[in-house]
Image (cartoon, rainbow, N blue to C red):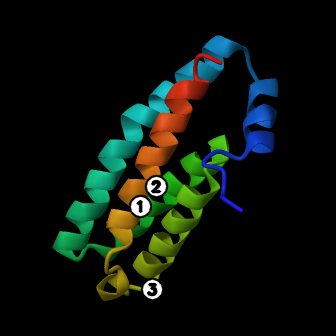
Amino acid sequence: MAKTTIDPSTFDNLKQMGDADFIRELIDTFLDDAPHMLKELSQALAARNAELFRRTAHSLKSNSNTFGALALAELSKDLELMGRDNRLEAVGDKLEKLAVEYARVETALKGMRNA
C-alpha cells in the first residue's frame, strides 16, 4: 500500500482551523521556508554544526506535521535526533531522501492550496 504524501485527516483538521486564504498563506509560507531549511541542513552538515542541524531539522519536522506530511516529518525527526546526539557522520544519504520527499510534498501542497 502506497503512503500518501499528505495525510488527509491531518490536512482536513487544519482546514477546520481557518478559511481558504489562511490555509493558502500557511502553505505558501511553508513552501517558501522549507527550501531554505533544506539548504541550511546541508550547510550545517558541511560545517559539522550539530546544534544548527538539530534546530533546523526540528523546525522542518514541526512544520511538516502541521500539514500531515508525515514521511517528511519522520525523516526530519531522524535527522533531528542525529543532530541532538552529535552523530552527523550517520546522516549519509538522508538529506537526499529528505529533498526527494520534500519535492513530493511541494507538488501535493501546490495542488491542495487551490482545493
- The residue shown at (58%, 65%) is 74
Find residue 101 and name its label. Answer: 2
- In-front residue for pair 59/31: 31
Q: Which badge, 3 or 1, is on the more N-terminal residue?
A: 3
Residue 65: % across, % down: 64, 50
What residue is pinned by disc 3? Answer: 85
How many angstroms separate mark 3 from mark 1 (CA)?
Answer: 19 Å
Label 3 element class: loop
Along the horizontal axis of the image, is 100 left or right of 113? left
User: Of circles 3 and 1, which is in front?
Assistant: 1
Residue found at x 56% / y 46%:
63
Residue for badge 1? 98
How many neighbours does mark 2 have within 10 angstroms: few (below 14), some (14-19), or many (20 or more)? some
Q: Earlier in the sequence, mark 2 or mark 3?
A: 3
Q: Does 108 sit left or right of 38 as displayed?
A: right
- Of tags 2 and 3, which is closer to the observer? 2
The quadrant of the picture occupied by the C terminus is top right
Q: Find residue 10 and report its image quarter.
A: top right
The residue lying toward the viewer, choosing from 81 and 31, is 31
What residue type is disc 1 on? Answer: Leu
Reply above or below: 4 against 90.
Answer: above
User: Do labels 1 and 2 touch, CB within 8 Å?
Assistant: yes
Name the spot of residue 111 as percent of width and height, x first.
55, 26
| The N terminus sits in image quarter | bottom right
Residue 89 picture location, percent across and down: 29, 87
